Image (spheres, rainbow, N blue to C red):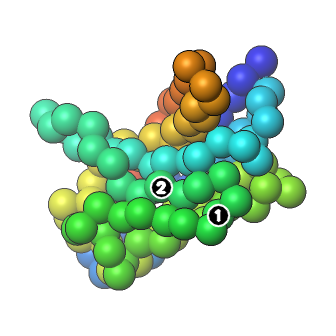
Amino acid sequence: QVQLVESGGGLVQPGGSLRLSCAASGFTFSVYSMFWYRQAPGKERELVASITSTGGSTIYADSMKGRFAISRDNAKNTVYLQMNSLKADDTAVYFCNAHWRIGRSEYDYWGQGTQVTVSS
């Protein structure tokens, strides 16, 4: 049974930090690229950051560069998102995504999301 379980969300003041975790099970985590997306109320889901299967390469959305950091621990089947200097605009549900493409086959899994609220 494939599972992606996000944790670490909550209420934080502007300028604060949070660390999100996404624990994976039921598939070979180490071959999947991992992504964090977010969706704010009334807005489309947007990509926050991505990391390759080995962790050797990361990509960030422009508005997150320098504030967010994605990392992974393949021994623990977990991907992280360190979020610093949080702003009210970062308020959203954050989702973890696992993606693997091999040949013509693609495998794509999503977590249920964790709420992040930035407010004073």
- Looking at the rendered image, the quarter that the C terminus falls into is bottom left
Q: Which mark is residue 55?
A: 1
The 10 Å Cα crowd at callout 2, few under 14, some 14 to 19, many 20 or more, is many
Q: CA distance from mark 2 to mark 1?
A: 9 Å
Q: What residue is at 27 percent from the left and 75 percent from the top?
A: 14
Residue that mark 2 sits on:
50
- What's under tag 2, amino acid-wise? Ser
Q: Is residue 116 above or below residue 62?
A: above
Task: Indicate which disc, 2 or 1, sits on the residue closer to the N terminus.
Answer: 2
From where the camera sits, is residue 51 visible? Answer: yes
Q: What residue is at 45 percent from the left and 41 percent from the top?
A: 95
Q: Is residue 86 above or below residue 10?
A: below
The 10 Å Cα crowd at callout 1, few under 14, some 14 to 19, many 20 or more, is some
- What's under tag 1, amino acid-wise? Gly
- Looking at the rendered image, the quarter that the N terminus falls into is top right
Q: Is residue 5 above or below residue 14?
A: above
From where the camera sits, is residue 18 visible? Answer: no
